[in-house]
Image: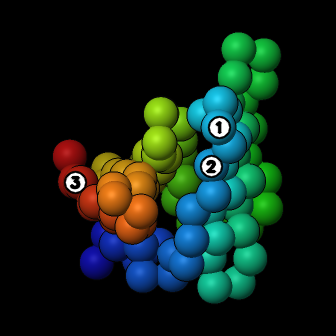
Amino acid sequence: MTQAEALARRLRRLSLNRQGTEAQVWLEEGFLYLRQDAHARFAQGVLPEGLLHFALFRGGVELRFQDGSRLRLSYRLGRLRKAVYFS
């Protein structure tokens, strides 16, 4: 099982702000706060093992891990979509 698949199982909810600069990824044991704008880029809170990089895009978040897997979270028709990619 990849690191992205493991995190997808522990994921509970995703909260995004309207501007697309902040996100909260809610996990079983807490949450991960992500911020990305022209002046700042940081993550704090419960950091998953192996998280290398994150990117916020309109309506979602992409998390990249050390093993090469990626987890893309977004909303589609009001439901949370989890897509795992491996490269």
User: Which element type, helix, strand or loop, lies under badge 2?
Assistant: strand
Judged left or right of residue 42, residue 56 is left
Which numbered marker is on residue 16? 2
Q: Which amino acid does label 1 sit on?
A: Arg
Q: Going 69% across and 23% down the picture, which residue do you hit?
A: 37
Write down the residue under mark 1: 18
Write down the residue under mark 3: 86
Q: Which amino acid does label 2 sit on?
A: Leu
User: Which element type, helix, strand or loop, lies under badge 3?
Assistant: strand
| Mark 2: few/some/many CA within 10 Å (<14, 14-19, 20+) | some
Q: Which of 7 and 83 is in front in this view?
A: 83
Q: Which amino acid does label 3 sit on?
A: Phe
How far apart in space, not on screen, are marks 3 and 2 (Cα)?
Answer: 25 Å
Q: Position of residue 65 (x, y in %)?
A: 44, 53
Q: Going 27% across and 60% down the picture, which residue do you hit?
A: 84
Residue 22: quarter of image? top right
Q: Which of marks 3 and 2 is in front?
A: 2
Q: Earlier in the sequence, mark 3 or mark 1?
A: 1
Residue 35: quarter of image? top right
Judged left or right of residue 6, residue 52 is right
Q: Going 70% across and 14% down the picture, which residue do you hit?
A: 38
How far apart in space, not on screen, are marks 2 and 1 (Cα)?
Answer: 7 Å
How many callouts does the rendering have? Answer: 3
